[in-house]
Image (spheres, helix red, strand yellow):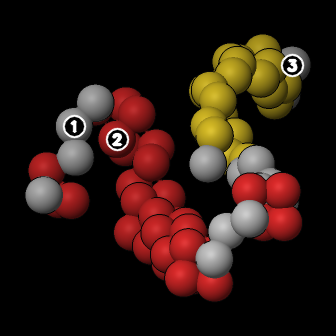
């Protein structure tokens, strides 16, 4: 999973503000190219699903504070 932080201008009521937005994307893995076994494919999927469920909801706060005490 890759993440980027970018600044996107946001206009409201003729006032311009700058908002930091976290953009998440995933890089597709070609299982055939890397010749992953079924066990490796399942492990990759399990780790990805765990990160989406447990880390992604807290990503913004982690980025702001650079700490993650609730995840330890």
> For this view, does 72 lie left or right of residue 34?
left
Residue with the mark numbered 1: 67
Q: Looking at the image, is mark 2 or mark 3 earlier in the sequence?
A: 3
x 69%, y 40%: residue: 23
Residue placed most toward the observer, 41 or 18? 41
Q: Do the CB atoms of the residues marked 2 and 1 lie less than 8 Å apart? A: yes
Coordinates of residue 54 in the picture (x, y in percent):
39, 69
With respect to residue 71, does 44 lie above or below? below
Q: Earlier in the sequence, mark 1 or mark 3?
A: 3
- The image quadrant that residue 9 belongs to is top right
Mark 1 crowd level (few <14, some 14–19, many ≥20, 10 Å Cα): few
Give how far apart the Cα atoms at labels 1 and 3 are: 35 Å
CB under 8 Å between discs 2 and 3? no
Please indicate whether residue 52 sits to the left or right of residue 62 in the image: right
Residue where numbered disc 2 is placed: 62
> Between tags 1 and 3, which lies in front?
1
| Few, some or many residues within 10 Å of mark 2 (<14, 14–19, 20+) | some
The location of residue 30, given as percent across then percent down, is: 83, 59
Q: Mark 3 = which residue? A: 14
Q: Is residue 45 visible?
A: no
Residue at the image position 34 percent from the left and 41 percent from the top? 62
Q: Is residue 34 visible?
A: yes
Residue depicted at x 63% and y 84%:
38
**Mark 2 against mark 3, which lies toward the viewer?**
2
Q: Residues within 10 Å of mark 3 (few under 14, many from 20)?
A: few
Q: Earlier in the sequence, mark 2 or mark 1?
A: 2
- Number of the label disc, if any, that sits on residue 2: none
């Amino acid at each position: 999973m890759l993440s980027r932080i970018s600044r996107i201008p946001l206009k409201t009521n003729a006032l311009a503000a700058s908002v930091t937005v976290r953009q998440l994307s995933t890089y597709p893995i070609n299982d055939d190219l890397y010749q992953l076994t079924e066990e490796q494919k399942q492990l990759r999927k399990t780790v990805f699903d765990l990160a989406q469920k447990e880390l992604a909801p807290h990503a913004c706060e982690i980025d702001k504070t650079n700490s993650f005490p609730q995840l330890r």
